[in-house]
Amino acid sequence: MNAELDGLERKVAQIIDLCASLRAENRRLRERVGALEDEKQALLARMNEARGRLEALLDKLPAE
């Protein structure tokens, strides 16, 4: 009986450790997703700016 309880205690401790590890990983992944979303927005803004400049240059070209 005591051995069974010791085994169960070890398994519970392993589950607790795993949960803590997964929570930490989840937090890191959420932070990474946030950073990537910020980067995506910055890149979209740069693309839109470049598109606007290209369209302005195209408008300045003489018609054929």
Image: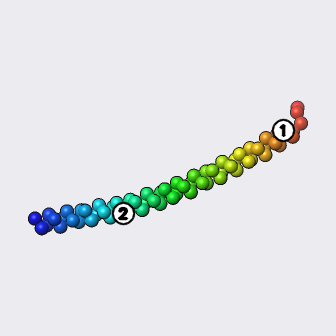
SS assignment at label 2: helix
Tell me the residue that label 2 is attached to: 20
Q: Mark 2 near mark 1, Cβ–Cβ under 8 Å? A: no
Q: Kindly report the distance in space between the C-alpha atoms of the residues bearing marks 2 and 1.
A: 58 Å
Circle 2 Cα neighbour tier, 10 Å, few/some/many (<14 / 14–19 / ≥20): few
Type of amino acid under label 1: Asp
Q: Could you tell me which quadrant the C terminus lies in?
A: top right
In the rendered view, does 60 fall on the left or right side of 49? right
Q: Return the x and y of residue 7 as percentages of the image width and height.
A: 18, 64
Q: Return the x and y of residue 37 as percentages of the image width and height.
A: 57, 52
Q: Return the x and y of residue 3 as percentages of the image width and height.
A: 13, 67
Against 11, is 49 above or below?
above
SS assignment at label 1: helix
In the rendered view, does 35 fall on the left or right side of 59? left
Circle 1 Cα neighbour tier, 10 Å, few/some/many (<14 / 14–19 / ≥20): few
Tell me the residue that label 1 is attached to: 59
Task: Identify which residue is drawn at 43% across, 57% down.
Answer: 26
Task: Identify which residue is drawn at 61% across, 51% down.
Answer: 40
Closer to the eye: label 2 or 1? 2
Marked residue nearer the N-terminal end (2 or 1):
2
Q: How is the image coloured?
A: rainbow
Residue with the most extreme top position? 64
Against 7, is 50 above or below?
above
Q: Return the x and y of residue 51 as percentages of the image width and height.
A: 74, 44
Residue with the most extreme left position? 1
In the rendered view, does 47 fall on the left or right side of 26? right
Type of amino acid under label 2: Ala
